[in-house]
Amino acid sequence: MSLLDYFKTTKPNSAKLAKERLQILVAHERNVRNQPSYLPELQQELLKVIRKYIQINQEDISVNFESDDNQETLELNIILPEQPQT
C-alpha cells in the first residue's frame, strides 16, 4: 500500500450495492410467490386466537413456509411477552 492509497477515499460501488439489493428483493419475491395463498389469512387467525389469551403485536408472530422436492414445512414463531398480561 502506497502513501497515496491511504488518502484515497473508497466510495462504495453503487452498482454493486444496487445489484445486491435487487438480488435480495428477487429472492424475497420468489419466496413469497412459492407460499400457499392461505398463509396471510392463517397468520391473522392465529393472531386473533392468541390475543384471546395474551396481548401480542402483529410483529410478534411470523409464519414461514418452505418446501423442497420431498416435504413442505410450516414454521410458526411467536414471541411471547415475559410476563403475560391478565
Image (tube, rainbow, N blue to C red):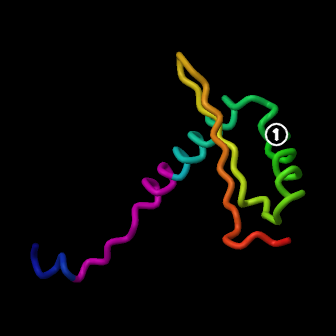
Where does residue 70 sit, x and y in percent of width and height? 53, 16
Q: Residue furthest front?
A: 86
Q: Is residue 81 magenta?
A: no
Residue type marked 1 = Leu
Which image quadrant is residue 16 in?
bottom left
> Which stretch is magenta?
7-20
Q: Residue furthest top?
A: 70
Residue found at x 54% / y 23%: 68
Quadrant into which the N terminus falls: bottom left
Where does residue 48 sit, x and y in percent of width and height? 88, 52
Where does residue 26 sit, x and y in percent of width and height? 59, 40
**Residue beneath disc 1:** 42
In this orientation, which residue lies closer to the viewer: 44 or 18?
44
Residue found at x 79% / y 45%: 43
Residue found at x 23% / y 83%: 7
84 versus 78 height, above or below: below
